[in-house]
Amino acid sequence: MKILIIEDDAGLSRGISFAFEQDGWTAFTAQTLKEAGAVWEKEKPDILVLDLNLPDGDGIAFCEKVRNCSDVPILMLTARDMEVDEIMGLTSGADDYMTKPFSVSVLKLRVQKILDRRQKSAEEETILRSGDILLDTKTLHVYRGKEREEVDLTMTEYRLLQYFLENMGRVLLKEQILQHIWDADGNFVEENTLSVNVSRLRKKLGGDSIRTIQGMGYLWEDKI
C-alpha cells in the first residue's frame, strides 16, 4: 500500500512516514501542493493524508482537484478546530478529518477504518442478496442457504437471476426479459424459452421467490 503525506511540518511528516513504513507501507511525502501534485501523478497512492494549510495554497482546493478525477481515500489534517473548517474539509471530498495535535497511532487507526469502509462498500456493490440467495457479480458465482452451497447455473440462468435480483419487487414483462437476456445479443428465441429457463431456475434455487404474473411476466419476491 502507498500513502502520500502532504504536510509542511517536516518533523510530523517524518513521524507519520516512519509509523506507516514500520507496517510495510510505502510512504511518500510532500511539503507543498506543487510537490504533492507531482507525486500524486507519478505514484498514484492508495490514500492521502492532507494538511489543510500549506505554504503555496489551500488543501481543500487540492482535495477537490483530486476528487474530480479519483475516489482515493483522503484524511485531512488541520491545526484549526473550528466547525466550519471541518465542514469545508468533509464537503470538499475528504473521508475523515483530524485536528492537531494528534496521536500517530490514532491516525493509523483512522486510516485503517477508512480503508475498511471502502473495501466493505466495494464488496457490497458486487453482491446481490435475497433471502438465502447470494449472487456475486464479480466472480459470477451464486450461493444458496446458510452453508453457502454453490448453485450450478448456466450463463443464461445466471443472467436471468441477476436481472430478477436487480429488480426485486417489480413486475418484469415477458417482453422486457426477452429483450434484456436474449434479444440484446440478436439471438432468436422460441416462444417457450423464457418459461423453460424460469422453471429450471426455480428448481435449482428452490423456494417460491419467482412468481408468475398471468398474462404479464414474472415478479421476484424478496424473502427476508
Image (cartoon, rainbow, N blue to C red):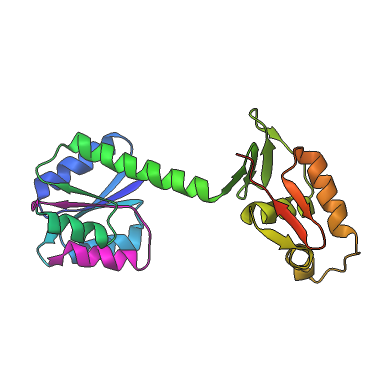
Q: x, y (%) of residue 55?
A: 9, 63
In the drawing, does residue 152 fall left or right of residue 65?
right
Instruction: Please state, as top left, top right, bottom left or bottom right, where the C terminus lies in the image.
Output: top right
- Count up the numbered dots: 0
What residue sits 84% from the left and 46% below the top? Answer: 200
Foreground pick, 34 / 163: 163
Residue furthest toward the top? 147
Vertical placement of 45 versus 111: above or below? below
Describe residue 91's horizontal placement relative to residue 219 as left or right. left
Camera-nearest residue between 35 and 174: 174
* 57 on left or right of 46: left
Query: Which quadrant does the N terminus fall into?
Result: top left
Which range is magenta?
57-81
209 part of magenta stretch: no
Q: Which residue is the extreme one toward the bottom?
A: 186
- Residue 131, percent across and down? 63, 39
- Tell me the residue at 37%/44% (across/down): 115
Answer left or right for 68 relative to 205: left
Q: Residue furthest front?
A: 214
Q: Position of residue 174 (x, y in %)?
A: 79, 63
Residue 78 part of the magenta segment: yes
Q: Quadrant of residue 19?
A: top left
Is 221 situated above or below 180?
above
Residue in the picture at 88% in, 52% down: 196
Residue 85 in the image, given as x and y percentages of width and height: 14, 58
**Front-lying residue, 26 or 81:** 81
Vertical side of 149 occupied by 98: above or below: below
